[in-house]
Image (cartoon, rainbow, N blue to C red):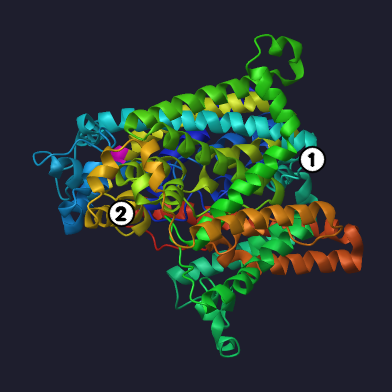
């Protein structure tokens, strides 16, 4: 770990945090975080650097070239920074504080039921009739066009800074930024603690870290990484680079280029099995999307995992079809529904299994955290003991802050606990299976509302819990912990102490988050909100209030609204009323994970992993299951006819395919930026990664 490496890593992380919104929402380019846990901005740039720039530096002067350790640190910190600009934080952070005022104005039902009145004080920006246009109107529309430009760049920056109504934003930022930083601190501690158990005691493979390591591993004196010495690497790299560049040029020049087709519709086969369309996500089995990156990455997974991912949607159809046939409603959104409740139960069961597997190590750290002399007695685990102590402190402070927002203490504990639980489970999925695109697609406030009912968990609690979930953990795959978990393994493989990397990551996150937030607000008030993106513009900012509105109306209809809002939580628990089908779905998820975990431990060569119940019937599996199945077939065939040696021989080919895909995405991002700078117009979007 060198000073040069640390500086470059921090600069790269700050660029990602500050430039992510402009890239995604202003220029509408391929998102920085697409590829999720294999973020294209990091891995694509890494490919460009190790294949072109670093060899040139080494040829010019060997000391200029970055070492393997420096590259590893840059990848770790920049990957962790990808948790800031996307759905991990910024995609919904400021929008959720201001956009509810706009939707309240255009939604009569909200006004009639005073739905914004359930938001806690200082959770949203300070808006009144006098400053609405400045705070909300300019936020949506951006700066007025056609005005006289400032005389120089300094005056322009000052003008942009002054356009932001900082006074209105101060209170909510003071409310949410501490929670964001504490959540990051808890995630760093959890990543460090679980990494020791998973790497040293359970010997997980960490496929994403293994892939990144294959790109940066270089012998002293060589210009290129070891993997680039293989002809198969260059075959896969050039093939996918050409295909993606050709398809991108087809978007820009459709009259001159012929696209390489990578998706097909098998809808005519529905005549053979028409019941398929009755099952949510069932029809997706007939839409074959071929992602070479996913097929190639299946080579880094065990055949058990790739088979499980490949047939997950088919298994879901077989399980769901009988329930649909008897009239059960399986429809699900991000707030609730049968699928979401089942996955919530599966996540909780998986967490219990993880705690059981690592019970000796975690119990030891927990006892040592409350023992004053534990660090002196156990020098080997001193970093992990301190991590446990800081985790406990962060949990207590976060719970207190959420309680101070107005959420009653038991619900505040459950909210923070389930948030951290979901971080751990998604990180485990990534570390064990190598899956880089995950959507839990269930929320704590939706789970509590369905499990307790609108009286025991009243609308005020739903809104507060909903805002906390939306701000901190709406998409756990892009949270800090999964990125860092893979990063710690990469650092460890390059002989950098995980504890040092964890400390640097937390420092980087705090710096990049603050700088990125300032850039974000200036950019939004300059360019306007992304009105063409329904998810951050409408769905997320309104989610907590939309879910509470029917509960408010239901309680009003039976005359129990005031009673539910005034009665203390322990008295309301006597009137718990779970929603229809909730208990069956929740228990199914728990039992299924426990049962498959038992079979996996006790039955030799059991072919399926219990992770299936956490992933099926989600958008990532809908898009990638066919590719995982194709990847499983290729790897299985290679092992069957050529043995393990054949799988190792084909490995550079798969690395080249992945590198070619992500580098092509970076090339189009660079071209898009240059096009915007020269023409002041948005480039034509060419996105192929599912998000």
* Span highlighted in magenta in the image: 521-525
Label ID, residue 355: none
Q: Residue at (63%, 43%) from the top-left corner?
A: 351
Q: Is residue 590 magenta?
A: no
Q: Nearer the viewer, residue 194 or 112?
A: 112
Label 2 or label 1, whichever lies nearer to me, is 2
Magenta segment, prevailing SS (helix, strand or loop):
helix
Left or right of 537: which side holds 417?
A: right
Image coords of residue 152 (percent x, y): 23, 34
Q: Are marks 2 and 1 in contact (CB under 8 Å)?
A: no
Q: Which residue is mark 1?
A: 203
Tell me: 600 left or right of 93. right
x and y, in percent, of residue 180 in the image: 43, 33
Secondary structure state at the residue bearing disc 1: loop
Q: Residue at x 90, y 58 (%)?
A: 645
Distance between mark 2 and mark 1 Cα atoms: 47 Å
In front here: 350 or 559?
559
Q: Which residue is mark 2?
A: 551
State whether residue 49 appears in this view.
no
Q: Quick one: label 2, few (<14), some, or many (20+) residues within 10 Å?
A: many
Left or right: 498, with 107 as reference point: right
């Amino acid at each position: 770990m060198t000073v040069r490496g640390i500086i470059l890593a921090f600069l790269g992380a700050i660029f990602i945090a500050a430039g992510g919104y402009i890239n995604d929402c202003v220029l509408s380019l391929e998102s920085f975080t697409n590829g999720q846990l294999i973020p294209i901005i990091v891995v694509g740039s890494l490919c460009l650097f190790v294949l072109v720039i670093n060899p040139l530096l080494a040829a010019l002067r060997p000391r200029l070239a970055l070492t393997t350790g420096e590259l590893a640190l840059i990848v770790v910190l920049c990957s962790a920074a990808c948790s800031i600009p996307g759905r991990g934080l910024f995609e919904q952070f400021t929008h959720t504080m201001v956009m509810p005022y706009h939707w309240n104005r255009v939604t009569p039902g909200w006004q009639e039921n005073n739905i914004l009145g359930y938001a806690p004080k200082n959770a949203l920006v300070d808006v009144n009739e006098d400053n609405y246009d400045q705070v909300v109107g300019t936020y949506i529309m951006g700066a007025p066009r056609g005005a006289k430009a400032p005389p120089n760049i300094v005056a322009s920056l000052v003008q942009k800074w002054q356009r932001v109504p900082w006074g209105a934003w101060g209170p909510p930022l003071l409310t949410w930024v501490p929670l964001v930083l504490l959540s990051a601190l808890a995630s760093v501690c959890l990543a460090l603690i679980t990494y020791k158990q998973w790497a040293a005691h359970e010997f997980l493979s960490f496929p994403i870290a293994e892939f990144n390591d294959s790109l940066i591993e270089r012998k002293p004196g060589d210009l290129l990484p070891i993997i680039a010495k293989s002809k198969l690497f260059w075959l896969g790299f050039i093939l996918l680079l050409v295909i993606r560049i050709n398809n991108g040029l087809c978007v820009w020049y459709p009259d001159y280029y012929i696209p390489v087709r990578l998706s097909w519709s098998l809808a005519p086969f529905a005549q053979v099995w028409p019941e398929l369309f009755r099952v949510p996500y069932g029809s997706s089995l007939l839409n074959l999307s071929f992602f070479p990156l996913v097929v190639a990455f299946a080579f880094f997974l065990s055949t058990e995992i790739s088979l499980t991912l490949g047939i997950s949607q088919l298994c879901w159809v077989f399980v769901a079809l009988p329930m649909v046939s008897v009239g059960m409603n399986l429809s699900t959104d991000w707030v609730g529904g049968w699928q979401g409740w089942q996955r919530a139960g599966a996540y909780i069961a998986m967490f219990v299994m993880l705690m059981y597997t690592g019970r000796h190590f975690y119990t030891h750290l927990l006892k040592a955290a409350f023992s004053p002399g534990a660090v002196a007695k156990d020098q080997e685990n001193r970093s992990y003991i301190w991590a446990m102590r800081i985790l406990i402190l962060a949990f207590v402070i976060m719970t207190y802050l959420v309680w101070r927002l107005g959420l009653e203490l038991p619900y505040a504990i459950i909210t923070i606990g389930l948030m951290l639980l979901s971080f751990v489970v998604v990180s485990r999925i990534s570390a064990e299976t190598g899956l880089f695109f995950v959507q839990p697609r269930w929320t704590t406030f939706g789970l509590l509302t369905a499990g307790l009912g609108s009286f025991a968990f009243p609308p005020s609690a739903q809104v507060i819990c909903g805002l906390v979930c939306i701000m901190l953990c709406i998409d756990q795959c892009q949270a800090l912990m999964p990125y860092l978990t893979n990063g710690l393994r990469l650092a460890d493989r390059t002989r950098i102490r995980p504890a040092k990397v964890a400390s640097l990551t937390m420092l980087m996150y705090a710096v990049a988050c603050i700088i990125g937030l300032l850039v974000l607000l200036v950019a939004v008030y300059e360019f306007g909100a992304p009105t063409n993106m329904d998810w951050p513009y409408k769905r997320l900012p309104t989610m907590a209030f939309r879910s509470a509105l029917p509960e408010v109306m239901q309680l009003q209809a039976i005359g129990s609204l005031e009673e539910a809002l005034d009665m203390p939580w322990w008295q309301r628990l006597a009137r718990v009323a779970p929603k229809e089908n909730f208990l069956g779905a929740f228990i199914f998820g728990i039992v299924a994970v426990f049962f498959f975990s038992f079979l996996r431990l006790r039955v030799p060569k059991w072919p399926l992993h219990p992770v299936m119940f956490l992933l099926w019937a989600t958008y990532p599996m809908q898009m990638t299951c066919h590719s995982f199945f194709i990847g499983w077939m290729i790897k299985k065939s290679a092992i069957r006819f050529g043995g393990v040696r054949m799988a190792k021989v084909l490995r550079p080919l798969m690395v080249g395919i992945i590198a070619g895909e992500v580098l092509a995405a970076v090339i189009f991002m660079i071209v898009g930026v240059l096009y915007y700078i020269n023409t002041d117009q948005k480039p034509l979007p060419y996105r192929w990664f599912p998000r």
